Image (spheres, helix red, strand yellow):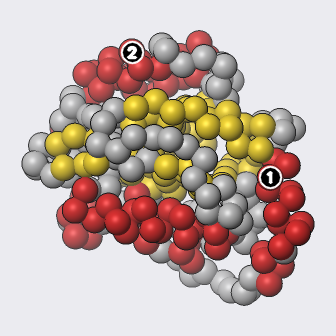
Amino acid sequence: MKNELIVAIIQTDLVWENPKANRDNIEHKVSTIKDVDLIVLPEMFSSGFTMNASLVSETMNDETISWLKRLAKEKNAAFVGSLVILENHNYYNRLVFVEPSGKITQYNKRHTFTLAGEHNVYTAGNEKVILNYKGWSICPLICYDLRFPVWARNTEDYDVLLYVANWPKVRIDAWDTLLKARAIENMSYCIGVNRVGLDGNNYEYSGHSAAYNTLGHRIDTIPKNKESIEIVTLEKVHINKYRGKLGFLKDRDRFILKA
């Protein structure tokens, strides 16, 4: 078990529907990062949030997954982000958590963004995933999932709630508010990684990536509206101290979530 988890947050612009250009850009940024446990990329980091799934989709055996495996081994750090995956004739907005060993944990976005027609293109997932990495229990989710607190509810005593996103500037106040709320209500670290720049539909993204502790306090200094790499350190002692002292999770409601 590792008492600290060192996380690199990559807040970056994305080249529209160009996986190779995005891989090259991200690899250049990653080359500057040393001695971290986890590197977090935005939602659909290889393409931007596109509905042109057939144009950018890959399988789990194609270039981007192989690239992530290579980088994870080279940096001795896990990588996490989402991309467009084609599997069994269905497209998924799939988050992958790639460890240095080559092990991959995957999560298919549960709440497809109906406002953009994502539900018409991508098949929604129905499984909540809790993964263990270096003794840390992590719940990885994607963008629109942030608006649905029941799906994220900490019934598993996870340590870190993690969101990767393409969350537009026009609704960024909701992003800021809900990230903080998810940290407080779940007594966990909550990290949200969002992109910057304009996409191919001329939607603007302003970043606002952030990391909160169990009390809802910011532990990062990530600037808004520009590319940035931020390193944050998560501490088990912090989680144990405040869960033990306050005990709010002991009073949580019991419920059954239907798919």
Relative to 57, does residue 242 appear above or below in the rendering? below
Amino acid tagged 2: His
Q: On residue 169, which mark appears?
A: none
Q: Earlier in the sequence, mark 2 or mark 1?
A: 2
Amino acid tagged 1: His
Binning the other alpha carbons within 10 Å of mark 2 as few (below 14), some (14 to 19) or many (20 upward) gives few
Relative to 171, does residue 8 appear above or below in the rendering? above
Residue 17 shown left or right of residue 246 in the figure: left
Relative to 46, does residue 68 appear above or below in the rendering? above
Q: Report the front residue among 256 and 38.
A: 38
Q: Position of residue 200 (x, y in %)?
A: 12, 43
Q: Position of residue 252 (x, y in %)?
A: 74, 82
Q: Is residue 87 visible?
A: no
Q: Position of residue 181 (x, y in %)?
A: 55, 70
Q: Are marks 2 and 1 in contact (CB under 8 Å)?
A: no
Q: On residue 28, which mark appears?
A: 2
